[in-house]
Image: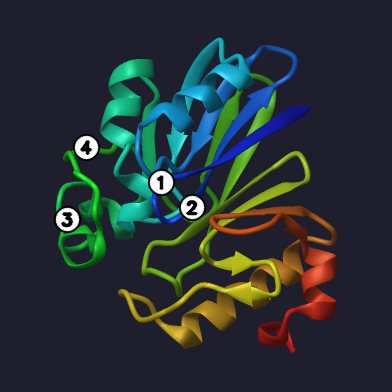
Amino acid sequence: MIEVFTAPVGAYGTNCYIIKEKATALAAAVDCAVFNRDYERLLDRAGVKRLEYILLTHGHFDHICGVAELKRRTGGKVCISERDAECLTDEYKSFNAHLGSFAQESVSPDILLHDGSVLTLGETSISVLSTPGHTQGSVCFYADGSLFSGDTLFYRSVGRTDLGGNAEELINSLKILMSRFDDARVYPGHGTETSLLFEKDNNPFLR
């Protein structure tokens, strides 16, 4: 069983998550917009014993600019899709050079993710689903009935596709998500939490 802690962090209100396994108190972070006081409070609130992974849903600047400092503070392994990995070292590919207001420090990935990859957090399995569309390397993470969707799926909306993405791929990724899970709780990259059942009935992009 897991607990999920969240806080909106940074100028773009990026939802940053801590997944904490109840049995072992081991934890994984999902995205880190910037490492600031808000993020430090999130770590404190979660009561993290050890951060095993820093899981990145995609490589846009508002999801990765705090990763280098988070890794330095915790030793967590940086995990990102192979297709978005260059965003960690190239602020033009992360779009920070074009749109961001953050200082992006380069950091190397420790684990390159692929569709079907599985990470172990104590007794909990975290499955990786490739969901290209918002970016080429967008992924979602699924653990214990919870889906961390990044900017692939939002409450009654979906992610934009004009920053290195593809609209047709995004719609196909959404169809795959809907076919694989019944009523996962959805923790998106921005905005309010939702569920796949709700989105099936209420999201105009899924009709």
Residue 112 seen from this side: no
Horizontal and vertical percent position of residue 73: 33, 17
Tell me whether the residue at label 4 lies in contact with that at label 3, contact meaning CB atoms closer than 8 angstroms: no
Tell me whether the residue at label 1 lies in contact with that at label 2, contact meaning CB atoms closer than 8 angstroms: yes
Residue at x 65%, y 14% (from the top left corner)? 25
Of callouts 3 and 1, the N-terminal one: 1
Marks 1, 4: nearer the viewer: 1
Left or right of 142 in this view: 60: left
Image position of 56 with respect to 60: above or below = above
Horizontal and vertical percent position of residue 55: 46, 40
* Residue type indicated by callout 1: Gly
Q: Which residue is labeled 1 in the image?
A: 10
Which structural element holds mark 2?
loop
Which structural element holds mark 1?
loop
* Residue type indicated by callout 3: Glu
* Residue type indicated by callout 4: Ser
Spatial distance from mark 3 to mark 2, Cα to Cα?
19 Å
Q: Nearer the viewer, residue 52 or 12?
A: 12
Please tell me the numbered disc located at residue 108.
4
Please tell me the numbered disc located at residue 13.
2
Residue at x 47%, y 32% (from the top left corner)? 38
Q: Which residue is labeled 3 in the image?
A: 91
